[in-house]
Image (cartoon, coloured by chain):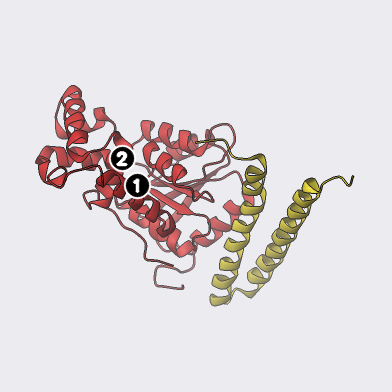
Amino acid sequence: MFNQDRETSRSSANDIRVVLADDHQLFRQGLKALLELERGITVVGEASDGLEVQRVSLEQNANVVLMDINMPIVDGLSATRELLRANSTIGVIILSMHHEEGHVFQALRAGARGYLLKTSRVSEVAGAVRAVASGLSLLDPSVTSSVVSEFKRMSSKQTPEDGLGQLTETEVKILQHVSAGMSNKEIANKLSLAESTVKNRLSVLFEKIGVLDRTQAAIYAITHGIAPTAVQSSR
Amino acid sequence: MPAPHPLARRIHDTILQLLGTALLKTELCEQLGRLGREDEMMGTLAELRTTLEETVGELRSIMNDLRTVPV
């Protein structure tokens, strides 16, 4: 849909700096041409493999990376992990043809803050770029149902008194940071705690909300509205 | 996760990528049309046709590989 956010290219210093990572050149070209019509978004780099995207994103000081999963040399999930290890402030959105829930969970586990299908309209991709750049998370509506199903499966193992109400203020903050893909060390720095304290608190937190790992905790945070999440309106 | 069937991988890596590109090009045509950039729109339409022709070629190639040898 043509809207006020879409107009002819006019980049500015305040634009969201985006890097495109996909080994299909024609796809990158088409996506770049469309994103360049979006106000406030500038494509500052492109990469055709999972190693190149790390270099380009850091060199170009990217805010958001649109990352394919299947790429040569290093796949998009490993590239996401490595990139966020180097700079955790970059928002990674997986843009893939894979709609299987396994890929979605792997992407979230790697630290991606968004997951969209390549069949999305560019207005939706641009919306995701803006959301992730402002610190939100976003999932394609067609994969959100898998995440919700996983949450229901996890919830069914819990008693009502377990979970959110049992969390302390610090534990909620830790959960929010986990859902943003931060490591224990980063959380410790952020909250002025020892890394070992964060680790111990996480163990208690996992037990309280009935999850086994960080991925499930992130899903819990998203589905409970603890993590700042924007879910796209249905197409 | 289990490794995908070679055919599923091939369809993902060729057909779906080409169709994803074709979808982008249709959207680009819409936007260029709205902006009155007709020359660019015509060029993008030609690219769209090429992409769809490549998709047909890939599908034919897959069908050919799947064809069983007559007994």
| Circle 2/circle 1 CB separation < 8 Å | yes
Q: Residue furthest front?
A: B71
What residue is at 63 percent from the left and 43 percent from the top? B9
Q: Which mark is residue B26?
A: none
What residue is at 34 percent from the left and 56 percent from the top? A131
Q: What's the chain of the residue with tag 1?
A: A
- State which tag comes first along the sequence, 2 or 1: 1
Q: Which mark is residue A150?
A: 1
Q: A39 or B70, which is in the foreground?
A: B70
Using the image, determine if residue A58 lies above or below residue A27: above
Chain that is yellow in the image: B
Callout 2 environment at 10 Å: few (<14), some (14 to 19), or many (20+)?
A: many
Q: Amino acid at mark 2?
A: Gln
Q: Amino acid at mark 1?
A: Glu
Chain that is red in the image: A
Q: Is residue A15 visible?
A: no
Using the image, determine if residue A66 lies above or below residue B35: above
Figure quadrant of the C terminus of chain A = bottom left
Q: Position of residue A73 (x, y in %)?
A: 58, 31
Q: Which mark is residue A216?
A: 2
Judged left or right of residue B15, residue B33 is left
Judged left or right of residue A63, residue B42 is right
Q: Secondary structure at mark 1?
A: helix
Q: Secondary structure at mark 2?
A: helix
Q: Position of residue A174 (x, y in %)?
A: 19, 37
Q: Position of residue A99 (x, y in %)?
A: 49, 51
Q: A209 or A22, which is in the foreground?
A: A209
